[in-house]
Image (cartoon, grey):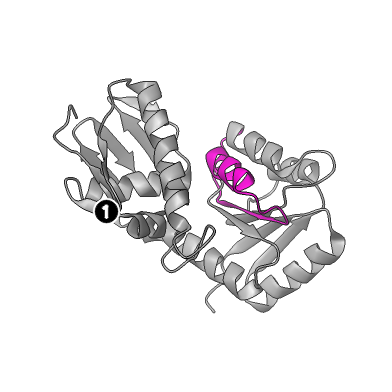
Amino acid sequence: MGNEAALIGIVDDDPLFRETLAGNLGDAGYGVRAWGDGEDFLAAMAQDDRPDLLLLDWKMPGLNGIEVLRRMRAARMTLPVIFLTVLSDQIFEEAALLGGAVDFIEKSRSFTILDRRIQLILKRGKAAGPEDAALRLGKLALDADSRRAQWRGRPVDLTVTEFAMVQALAAKAGRDISYRELYDAGRGKGFHGGAGEDGYRTNVRAAIKRIREKFKAVDPDFEQIGNYPGFGYVWQAGRHG
């Protein structure tokens, strides 16, 4: 399946789940490393090669998953993180994405869905060509390689998903971008999220709210992201930027 070069890390305190998941990933062609708790994982990352992507449980003794993620980002570990958890409330998903995770998947979902998400995230990380590596639009600067954004020369601390949405808006500045297109930019095409048929709209609205807050923390006059009621959003290129 072309996954031989990708090393997937697992941090989960349930030994049976961890062993089963590692076996499924191995059968799918991935390399696998697994840890039973966050402390062991973080200690290993200080010495060993880092995986290409991490599957992280939330509820664990000692350090919980969100604290592991915070420490990773504080240590500038930028590998993509998928939360794989029994928790399903939207508040946990929002906290995970706000903390820098690229996805949040319930453990009850099939391995086929998880494998597809892993492939999309790994592909997205390799997809940017030289022409996509950097984008400048007025006061906005985006670096696709590092997934870093700047506004008026100051860094804006976006998650990977938020960065992808800003990138999608800025790449089509002045044009209305649908909720679905923005969700696909952040999470991968065809992935269903949220409650109900149009549940993804709630996720996009929450993400755009966070994005606006982060830009306004840098520039209180930031008004670049406009609403298109019932459809989506637009990057207003000519508005003070």
Q: 36 above or below 140?
A: below
**Can residue 85 be found in the magenta stretch?**
yes
How far across and down, in percent of the image, does residue 174 sit? 16, 46
Quick one: SS at disc 1?
Answer: strand
Q: Image point 22% across, 51% down: which residue? A: 176
Q: Image point 70% across, 66% down: which residue? A: 108
Amino acid type at circle 1 is: Ile
Residue 110: quarter of image: bottom right
Nearer the observer, 40 or 17: 17
Residue 147 visible in the displayed image: no
Q: What stretch is highlighted in magenta?
A: 75-100
Q: Residue furthest top?
A: 220
How far across and down, in percent of the image, does residue 141 sit? 28, 36
**Can residue 210 be found in the magenta stretch?**
no
How far across and down, in percent of the image, does residue 145 sit? 39, 47
Nearer the observer, 216 or 72: 216
For the N terminus, the quadrant is: bottom right
Within 10 angstroms of label 1, few (less than 14), some, or many (20 or more) residues?
Answer: many
Query: As drawn, is 29 to the left or to the right of 182?
Result: right
Residue 236 visible in the displayed image: yes
Q: Residue furthest left?
A: 238
Query: As drawn, is 215 to the left or to the right of 95?
Result: left
Identify residue for label 1: 177
Q: Image point 65% across, 68% down: which residue? A: 109
Q: 133 above or below 224?
A: below
